[in-house]
Image (cartoon, rainbow, N blue to C red):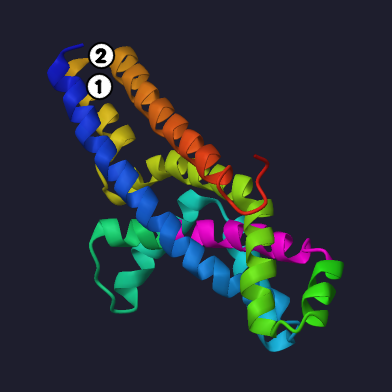
Amino acid sequence: MSVKLFELLLKASIYTVTISVVSILIGFAIAILLSGMLLSGRGLFVRPAQIFISFFRGVPLLVQLLLIYNLLPVIGINVPSIVAAIIGLSLCTAAYQAENLRGGFASVPLGLVESAEMVGLTPRQIFRRVKVPIALRLTFPALVNEAILILKASSLVSVVGIVELTRMAQDLAGSTFLPLQLFASAGLIYLVINWLVALSGGLIENRLPGAPR
């Protein structure tokens, strides 16, 4: 396989990384809202969050992407394919991240919260100084794992016309008749990207409050 073909794969991987990073960040923002709704204890908020999470965790991502891509024009929203892909990935990862965050907040020891109340901290201070650091520490490995899963799942956005890494490998394989070399190279690029994500996640985790020194 020529260097030129490998360069084309590397350029396509930029779309993979960009779409994944943007989707993960948007999904995290939505997940914070969803986890807050789940922990509110109010049926008006809890039930919609549960329905949202059940749908996006229960329906295959491929179906979600096709549904969103075809639904948006029907309701009068015309957006580029890349936007539809980001929306689909964001909503999907938000459902999983919300459950991770909910579990983290639910695992905060009640004794620590009560101790914070006894020393006079306000509910907002308790949330910011006690609950958030502990919940983030507990859920961070799961959040990093979810980021890696989204990076791999981003290969599915090719069904809505995005020429990312996997789609580029398919197109080049069809024109050069070098499927083995091209898909092996694409797999290697995915491996390196995910290894870097895992490595970065480990370094960040070690710097979080409460991490062993």
Q: Which mark is residue 173?
A: 1
Disc 2 on helix, strand or loop?
loop
Q: Say if residue 14 shows up in the picture.
A: yes
Vertical side of 38 occupied by 158: above or below = above
Disc 1 marks a residue whose amino acid type is: Ala
The question of residue 50 being in magenta is answered with no
The circle drawn on residue 123 is none
Q: Is residue 7 above or below residue 78?
A: above
- Where residue 180 appears, as percent x and y from the top left, is 34, 13
Instruction: Give the dominant element type of the magenta stretch: helix, strand or loop.
Output: helix
According to the picture, the residue beneath numbered tag 2 turns out to be 178
x and y, in percent, of residue 132 in the image = 63, 66
Q: In the shown orientation, is residue 77 left or right of residue 88?
A: left
Q: Residues within 10 Å of mark 2 (few under 14, many from 20)?
A: some
Q: Amino acid at mark 2?
A: Leu
Q: What span is colored magenta in the figure? A: 89-109
Name the residue at 28% across, 36% down: 13
| Place of residue 129 in the rendered image (x, y in percent of width and height, measured from the top left) | 64, 70
Q: Are marks 1 and 2 in contact (CB under 8 Å)?
A: yes
